[in-house]
Each structure stands twice: as C-alpha cells, then as structure tokens.
Amino acid sequence: MNSGKKAAPRTIGLKLVSIAMAVLLWLYVVNQGKLTARGNVAETELEYRHLAEGLSVEGPDTVSVKLWGVFQETGDIIAWVDLSGLTEGTYQLPVNVKPVKGAMFTSVKPNKVEVMLEKTKEYMFPVKCEISRNPSEGYELLDIVTTPDRCTITGERSAVERVAAVVCPVDLGDIRDTSSFTAKLLARDANGSLISENIKIIPDTAVVYAAVVPEKEFKKVPVIPATRGDPEEGYSLVQVSVYPETVSILGNSIRLASVEQLSTEEIDITAKKYPFSLEVNVVQPEGLKVYPSRVVVDVDIRQTSENEVEQ
C-alpha cells in the first residue's frame, strides 16, 4: 500500500511533463514556416483532365477547397474533373481534390459541377502583317510576305467566333535590306484586343520575308537625242524629235538632284538621205531607274536645195 501511494506523485509528474512537451511541440510545429492548425478556405483553379481530341469544355474556372489540420497555406491544392471517355454533351461530374500533406480533412464546394463538351470550331484565316515599327528614316518597305500566308484557328466555339483577324507582328526598325525571321501569330477580335484563351493557332508562327530599301523619289527630265555622223552629201539633218519628250527617273534624292536631262544612245545618220524612225534606249545613270527605258526617235533628213548649196 505505501509503495503505491508514493508512486502516484511520480506518475502525475510524468503526465504533466508529457503534456508540457506536447504543447511545446505543438507550438513549435504551428509556428514553423506559415503553418496553420485551423480550417482554411482556398479558391482553387479547376482543371479538366483527359479531354478527348476534337472537343472543347465549358465549366466553372474555380472551386472552393476547405482544409482542416496542420498544412502549408502556400502548398499546392489541386482540384480536377475527370473527362475520360466522355463525348459531346452536358454532364454533372464530381470534383476531385489531391490530398494535401498535413491536412486531416478536405472538402470542396461545389463537389459536383456542370460541364458542357462540344466539338471544337475550326476556321481558316489569312495571316496579316502588323507593322509595329516602320523602317528608319531614309528607308522604305519594298515588299513583305509571310509563309504560310494562312492558318487555322480551333477551340471553343464562343472564342473562335470572336476572332476577327490573325496578325503577324513585324518590327522593321532595324532592317536595312532583305531579311527573314520567325514571328509569333496572334489572334485579335474586332476591337483589336488579343484573344489567347480557349483557342489554338495552327501553325502558331510564320516566317516573314521583308525587303527594305533606301527611300527613292521620282523626277521627270527631258530626253535629248544623240546623233553621230553626217547625212549623204547634198542632204541635211532638218530635225530630230523624241517621243515621249520626258521620262521619269527613280532613285535616291541626292542622285536625282544632279540629273537635269538624259540622252538617248547615239543614232548613226552617216550617209543617210531619207527620214527614218527607230526605237532606242535612254542612257541610264548609275544607281537610277528610268521609265520608260526606250523612246522613239524621228529623224528628218532632206535633200539640200540648189539655193542652199549656192549659199
């Protein structure tokens, strides 16, 4: 009996020590790295898994997940709906939640969601170049093409039907010659806003070929016929006329400023005694383009009268 009475205080003391250590351990755990020992509600993105090819899904984007226990508040909470084997139609499906480490109990609200599966919509769109920056001063865009020049948009019907254009952003600010580069294709609605969710662009990139050249100007100048030789004795050159009388030249403005007129290739009138016409080239200055590059020259040669001979 005496030995039993003496053991009681020691047993109570051990229990108190155990409780104190448990409380200290609990406080340590609770205060480690944003841990919580209460219920916690998190708005969680809802995933849709195993969607069959050729179908799109419409349903809630998020659900509320409540956890009880000791867990990391920043830990991953994953909620999903399994769409395995489902075809086009409307379904009431359960929401699954991945177990969270440290949580003693987990609940999700709603625990079932309504989802609608429908066949994806598909449209063909031309690819348009959207120039974000023009060529630098003194340069101009000569031509620009994309490969491919068309693409396909697939996805949810409501999203695809909002697409008004598919554009290819192009920055020409640093291009000085013919260049090629790959650019990401973007879908825009009628207001020019970007559409990126619930659609897929196939292909999603295009190769852009851009030709940037020094800026050119036009200028009109007269054409002067050039001849060599003399008509046959007793005949004289009366007149040489050109049609058209002026031509356009295209080129750099500095080069154009130095050109006031152009000449034809030399026309040989040696020993000629009759009028004639012919088409000849206009002499083209280096670095400039001439339009038209050929002109018609009328050469009027007549017999010299006796009075003119006597004079």
Image: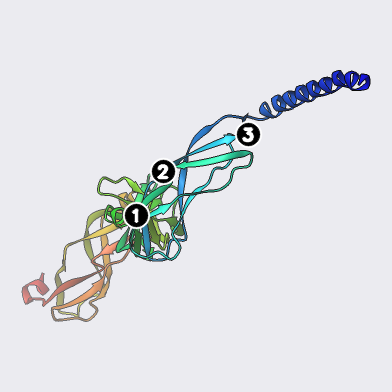
Q: Secondary structure at mark 2?
A: loop
Provide residue 141's location: percent of width, then percent of height. Answer: 35, 54
Which residue is under mark 1? 167
User: Is the C-beta separation of discs 3 and 1 under 8 Å?
Assistant: no
Q: Secondary structure at mark 3?
A: loop
Q: Nearer the viewer, residue 23 or 224?
A: 23
| Distance Cα–Cα, label 3 vs label 1 | 51 Å
Identify which residue is drawn at 22% across, 56% down. Answer: 220
Provide residue 19's location: percent of width, then percent of height. Answer: 75, 24
Up-down relation of residue 158 to residue 151 (above or below):
above
- Quadrant occupied by the C terminus: bottom left
Up-down relation of residue 146 to residue 269 (above or below):
above
Whether residue 139 appears in this view of the structure is: no
User: Is the C-beta separation of discs 3 and 2 under 8 Å?
Assistant: no
Which residue is under mark 2? 110
- Left or right: where 296 falls relative to 168: left
Q: For the residue marked with disc 1, what is the amino acid? A: Val
- Left or right: where 99 falls relative to 181: right
Provide residue 119's location: percent of width, then percent of height. Answer: 33, 64
Q: Nearer the viewer, residue 3 or 29?
A: 3
Up-down relation of residue 277 to residue 36 (above or below):
below
| Distance Cα–Cα, label 1 vs label 2 | 40 Å
User: Is the C-beta separation of discs 1 and 2 under 8 Å?
Assistant: no
- Quadrant occupied by the N terminus: top right
Q: Secondary structure at mark 1?
A: strand
Q: Sort mark 2 into few (<14), some (14-19) or many (20+) by Cα contacts within 10 Å.
A: few
Which residue is under mark 3? 70
Q: Nearer the viewer, residue 251 or 190?
A: 190
Q: Which one is earlier in the sequence, the residue at label 1 or at label 2?
A: 2
Residue furthest to the front in view is: 1
Q: Sort mark 1 into few (<14), some (14-19) or many (20+) by Cα contacts within 10 Å.
A: many
Q: Quadrant of residue 226?
A: bottom left
